[in-house]
Image (cartoon, rainbow, N blue to C red):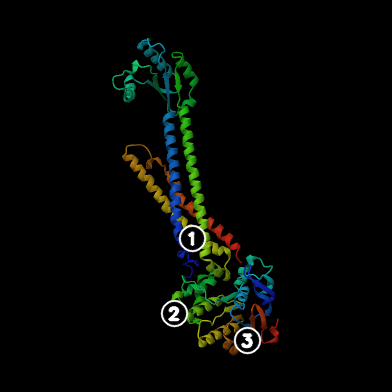
Amino acid sequence: MARRKTDIPFGQDPATRLLPWIVAVMVYIAGLAIAGAFVLAAFADRWEAGLAGALTVQIPPPADEALAAASRDQTVAEVLNAVRSTQGVASAEALASEEMRRLLEPWLGKTVDPRDLPLPTLISVELQDGRHAGNIDMADMRRRIQAHAPTAVIDDHGQWQARLVSFLGALRLVAAVLVSIVALAGLIMVVFGTRSGLLAHRSTIELLHLFGAQDNYIARQFQREALKAGLKGGIIGVAATAATVVGLGHGAASAGTTLPGTAVLEVTDWVILGVLPLATAAIAALAARWTVLRALARMV
Amino acid sequence: MIRFENVGMRYGTGPEVLRDVSFELPQGSFHFLTGTSGAGKSSLMRLMYLAHRPSRGLISIFERDLSTIPRADLPALRRKIGVVFQDFRLLNHLTTFENVALPLKVKGASEGMIRKHVGELLAWVGLSDQMHAHPATLSGGQQQRAAIARAVVTRPQLLLADEPTGNVDDAYAVRLLFLLQELHRQGTTVVIATHNHALIERFKHPVLHLDDGILMRVGEDPIYDG
């Protein structure tokens, strides 16, 4: 019976009662930032995988417009043969003029024939499974192509990918900084909450000391209270994060986009989010313990 | 048991509330501590129950010199001391049982030992029927008895009581003193700070008298004169 309650009446302290809700807000913000970083990482992987197995060959329009379309078609056919004969290439197709017309229609209208315009011919190249621009002989492919079209350019999307990776890296850094700031703010809240608790319960703490309580005995009670607040706040915060992510996913799905959805977060991502309340509770408990022990060391 | 040598005490940077206090209390003795309000009785008690350090002078308690004792050793000394505070200082969120059990819990006593000792003590002070009551629902006399039970539950070697008869009538004050005498007979050293001269007259124990922070009289028996 005597061990059921804490010796210190934490429930009477407004700062202690508010702490789980403050922690919940902090964990919610941190959880969203972490989930955002996971979503970005998944997008990056997905885009990279989609682009890595493909190349685009651009054959610029001939300088002399008088050149017959037949000559251009022959060059395209020769380049196609050269590309298809390169080791590691699964398929290569020139973008059909119908497809070009469809792509340009929003800007040029229906009456313009792309073949009348000085547009490059685009050849879409699919590489064999598991291949990417880095592990096929690009020099050989370039030599074969340029034998028929000396001004042709091979775009392996590397530059675009590099920019994408750099942009996503910056976003992830922003997420990491946000999580760090929220963690620091949470830590400061726990330290100040504990200090205010020490002040509010000073007479009880003095009484416990007079009964012969070691600092550890008192610190353990604050530590347990912070652990409970961290766990409760963490669970509420992560639950709110999960609800937001799932809600956004359903919203995105109903809008017909492939943007954030639950499927974007992997099982491991959910596990990491699930560990967040435990980490929060552990950090809160350690911060409270450190604060109490430091304060008690200054008492008689 | 307790020895004070030229002890001075001040709160913060304020004036000295105790000046050049010297006395010695042998083990198993029983003393009254008297003096007018503001004479320094509570401050002297605070020094004895190790809630405050002296600003000068030497205090030796249980053969340990307080000026050299490490802070980590204080809890062990404090566990040998029982204190009855003037305002009782019972914790309102705990029941009578839990309040009395607190010093044992701090000491790390087992649940069984706590139940046994606290049950006995509550019966001794006549509060068995109030063990689940919270202090706010107890009368002044009941709170006082709970505070005494809490002070002695660990069988302390030294019992300090600050104005324990301040809130009760004379008849109850006498009963209380018999209770404390019983503890004294079992070997506990007792110091009682009080204004109640009728009690001092009746129980004939040596007296420490404080006047404006200075110890004027030590005992009625020359053996205690410092």
**Where does label 3 land, which residue?**
B205
Does residue B67 appear anywhere in the picture?
yes
Question: Of the residues shown, which amino acid type is indicated by label 1?
Answer: Glu
Q: Label 2, secondary structure: give it.
A: helix
- Quadrant for the C terminus of chain A, please: bottom right
The image quadrant of residue B211 is bottom right
Q: Position of residue B199 (x, y in %)?
A: 57, 87
Marks 1/2 in contact by CB < 8 Å: the verdict is no
Tell me the residue at 66%/65% (across/down): B70
**Where does label 2 land, which residue?**
B129
Return the residue nearer the eye: A85 or B208.
Answer: B208
Question: Of the residues shown, which amino acid type is indicated by label 3?
Answer: His
| Drawn side of residue B39 relative to residue A259, left or right | right
Judged from this view, the residue extending furthest toward the left is A111
**Where does label 1 land, which residue?**
A225
Q: Label 3, secondary structure: give it.
A: loop
Question: In this rendering, do the residues under marks 3 and 1 share a single chain?
Answer: no
- Image mark 1: chain: A
Counting residues from the N terminus, which is met first, the one under dot 3 or under dot 2?
2
Return the residue nearer the eye: A179 or A126.
Answer: A179
- Image mark 3: chain: B
Return the residue nearer the eye: A74 or B112.
Answer: A74
Q: Position of residue A251 (x, y in %)?
A: 33, 42
Residue A152 higher or lower than B148, as above or below: above
Residue A63 higher or lower than B120, as above or below: above
